[in-house]
Structures are given as structure tokens and as C-alpha cells.
Amino acid sequence: MRQDFVLEWLGGAAEKRFRRVRPEDASLPWDTLRPSDYDARAVEGARAWWTELAANEVAAVVQFSSVLSALACAQAPLDLVGMTSQFLSDECAHVELGARAAMALGGAAPRTVDFQQAVASPPSDLTPLQWANERVLRVSCVAEVLAEAAAARTFVACTEPLPRALYTSILRDEVYHKQLGALYIEWAYEDWSDEERARLGRVVADELAKFRGLWSVPLAPVGPTVDEHRLGFLKRGELGQVALDAALRDVVKPLAEIGVTIDDEAFARAFGPDVTRPT
Ligand SMILES: [Fe+2]
Ligand SMILES: [Fe+2]
């Protein structure tokens, strides 16, 4: 069900406990951003962007919850499960950063969300291990890879201290969220049959297709610095190009190298008819 996107903060014991896990970063330069220094339309775009980032980070909490439960059910190594459990608080901290950035720019942009859509439950015909394979690939090997690539490129394009500091903080965590995929595959790979690798190829294609909207716009390389970049976001065509490059270079190619391949039809569904496979 779609609802208004709202964030609440309880304070007291909940805040104390959360802050023990994710201390507030006192070095973040919150007061350096003055919205009046920028083009009004860019500021409006930035409020929408940071609000969307906060909402996407809530969705990441939902996604990693399902990865965590799938890993535990599959009796994955305990340290890997423990490592993944920390990602939930990381993503909560990213929600907070995105929301506070929107507030620093004059307030969050109104938007609706349906986080229940991101809840995944295992189909009865999959073993716990197959379900864990699928959840890790969808979240760590696709969604987190694209998110990290976008954040990293935006950080490079961005010149202002606050958005740069926020991306630094976010990227410090995202690298591990992505790394989970490699660590998991190293552990699980020997048990993957040819059929399972083929099934996972379809799973990856299906996950990539969810991002097709990103690269279905006129694409452009990231251009010279503009107010959008200063305020911490890329133009749509720039973001699409970054996401497409990452999908081909960091998802399709390395997975194909370990036998998780996407057939031509599914590739065209995810990327459209004009994109060629990486070699
Ligand atoms: Fe995140
Ligand atoms: Fe993440």
C-alpha cells in the first residue's frame, strides 16, 4: 500500500542504543550548505534527490532483512550472517543522513512509498540455499553495486563539503554491502549446479530489469560541474549512464565469468535492443 513517506525518531533508550552502534558523526559540516547560494530549481531537485535517497535506504533495510533471514535459514557461516546483520543499522544511518541533507536544503520533498513491495518471501520450491543465493545476488550483486557506483561517481562530481562528507560516510559502508556478494559466492559456489547457475542468470536479469527506467533516458557522460553536482546529485541522463556502465561492467561481466549468464532475450529485456554485451 502506498503511503506518505514519513520518518519518526523515538529518542531515549532507542536512540542511545542505536547511537552505540552508529555514533553521530560530529565532523559532518551541516551548516556549510546555504540553499540561497544555488539555482532554485537545482535546490528543488536536490531536496527531491536526498528525500529519494532516504526512501531508498529504508528499502535497503527491508532488502537486507530478507538477505539476513535467508542466510540464517541456509545456515551460512555465522560470521557472514553477523556481518550482514550490521548492514541493517548501516542503512538506517544512511536514511538519517539523507533525511538530514533534505532538511538542510529546506525540507524533504513530499513523496509516497510502498516498502511492503520490497518484502520478499521464499517460494516453496526453493531450498534454503537456493533462496539465499537468489537474495544475495539480487541485493548485494545488483542493487548495492548500482547504488555504490552512483554514489561513488556523484562523490567525484560533487564539490561542496557537506554532500561530499555524506557520500564519504555512505561509501565507507557500501563497499562492505557489495563485498558480501563476493564472500557469499566464494562460500556457496562449489554447490551451484549448472541448472542453479542458469536459474541465477534469470534472477539477475530480472533484478536488472527493475532498474531499466534508469538507463531508458537519453544518456550522457557526467559533464562539467553544475549546481546539481554541487548539491550532491547527477542529472538523469548522467545517472543513467553511470548505472548502465556499472550494470554491464560490474554485474553482467563478472557474473558471466563464473557461469551466471543472461540469455539474449533477458538481456534485451533488461537493457533494451541497443545495448551490447560487455566483452
Ligand atoms: Fe545505503
Ligand atoms: Fe547499502
Image (tube, grey):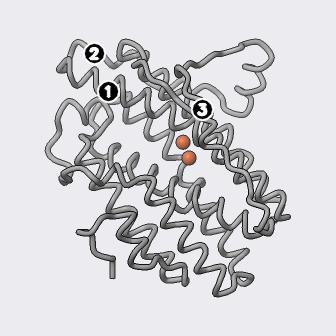
Q: Residues within 10 Å of mark 2 (few under 14, many from 20)?
A: some
Q: Quadrant of residue 59?
A: top right
Q: If the image is split into quadrants, where does the N terminus sit?
A: top right
Furthest-bottom residue in view?
194
Is 162 on the left or on the right of 91, as rendered?
left
Tag 1–tag 3 contact (CB < 8 Å): no
Q: Residues within 10 Å of mark 1 (few under 14, many from 20)?
A: many
Q: Quadrant of residue 119?
A: top right
- How far apart marks 1 and 2 lie (CA) works out to 10 Å
The residue at the point 17 percent across, 39 percent down is 225
Q: Amino acid type of disc 3?
A: Ala
Ligand 1 contact, mark 1 (Cβ < 8 Å): no
- Of the image marks 1 and 3, the number of the one nearer the N terminus: 1
Residue 144 location, x and y as percent?
52, 53
- How far apart marks 3 and 2 lie (CA) works out to 23 Å
Residue 74 location, x and y as percent?
82, 64
Marker disc for residue 93: 3
Q: Residues within 10 Å of mark 3 (few under 14, many from 20)?
A: many
Q: Amino acid type of disc 1?
A: Ala
Q: Is residue 251 above or below residue 143?
A: below
- Of the image marks 3 and 2, the number of the one nearer the N terminus: 2
Q: Amino acid type of disc 2?
A: Pro
Marker disc for residue 46: 1
To which residue does mark 2 refer?
A: 35
Residue 216 location, x and y as percent?
28, 53
